[in-house]
Image: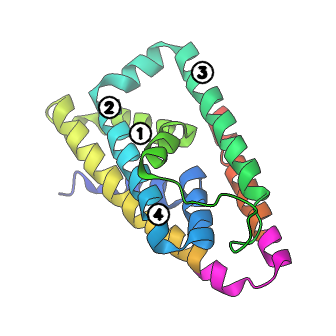
Amino acid sequence: MTSILPLLLFVAVATVTPGGATTLATASGARFGFIRSIPLMLGIAMGLALLAAVAALGLSGLLLAMPSLQTAVKAIGSAYLLWLAWRIAHNGPPHTSDGPARPVTLVSGVLLLWLNPKSWAMTVGAAASFALLASSPHRLAMLLGTAFGVAACISLALWCALGVLLARLFRTPRHWHILNLAMGALLAASVIPTWR
């Protein structure tokens, strides 16, 4: 157990820190409420668990060996996150027709996660750093997938609950405009570390 404590700490910190997925969970909680945001949160958590497992099975080696593939993944993911940031920043209050009418689905949550450069960096880094915790790539895939999936569920639930709380506090269109701009800016800013 003591040998996996550093992994658990890494996973907890990596999933709870602000980024694209946490910003989306907060924005969804504010706009649609906790229950209607569950498919998004489950999709992101499942996507992260799957990505961590795939990284443990060898994706990390492929990405490290092919810098052009790394750049392509970062470029596509960054463009998509910036588009989402723009959409969030231009949303109106939840009770208006400005912004999406329905929450993100489970499948879209998985795809969103796979387009998030921070997720790629986290999982590839974890696969490389903690490879010696398991006796085979398959066991490492199970360990990383489980750790990231559970941690993401907890983290996203906390961020979504924060969004629900903000929705109760914000009463005017001006409040919502400020919140949406802030959420869009945070999501856009989450792209910056992937290009350093």
In screen coordinates, is 181 left or right of 6?
right
- Of mark 2 and mark 1, the one earlier in the sequence is 2
User: Do callouts 2 and 1 mark residues in contact (Cβ within 8 Å)?
Assistant: yes
Gap in Å between the C-alphas at discs 4 and 1?
17 Å
Of badges 3 and 1, nearer the viewer stands 3
Gap in Å between the C-alphas at discs 3 and 4?
27 Å
Give percent across and percent down for residue 155. 44, 64
Identify which amino acid the numbered label 2 is placed on: Val
Q: Which portion, as a residue range, is magenta?
A: 165-178
Q: Residue tagged by mark 4?
A: 156
- Of mark 4 and mark 1, the one earlier in the sequence is 1
Of badges 2 and 1, nearer the viewer stands 2
Q: Residue tagged by mark 2?
A: 54
Asked whether 133 falls inside the magenta stretch, the response is: no
Give percent across and percent down for residue 46. 35, 48
- Of mark 4 and mark 2, the one earlier in the sequence is 2
- Of mark 3 and mark 1, the one earlier in the sequence is 3
Image position of 155 with respect to 193: above or below: below
Say which mark, if any, is on residue 123. Answer: 1
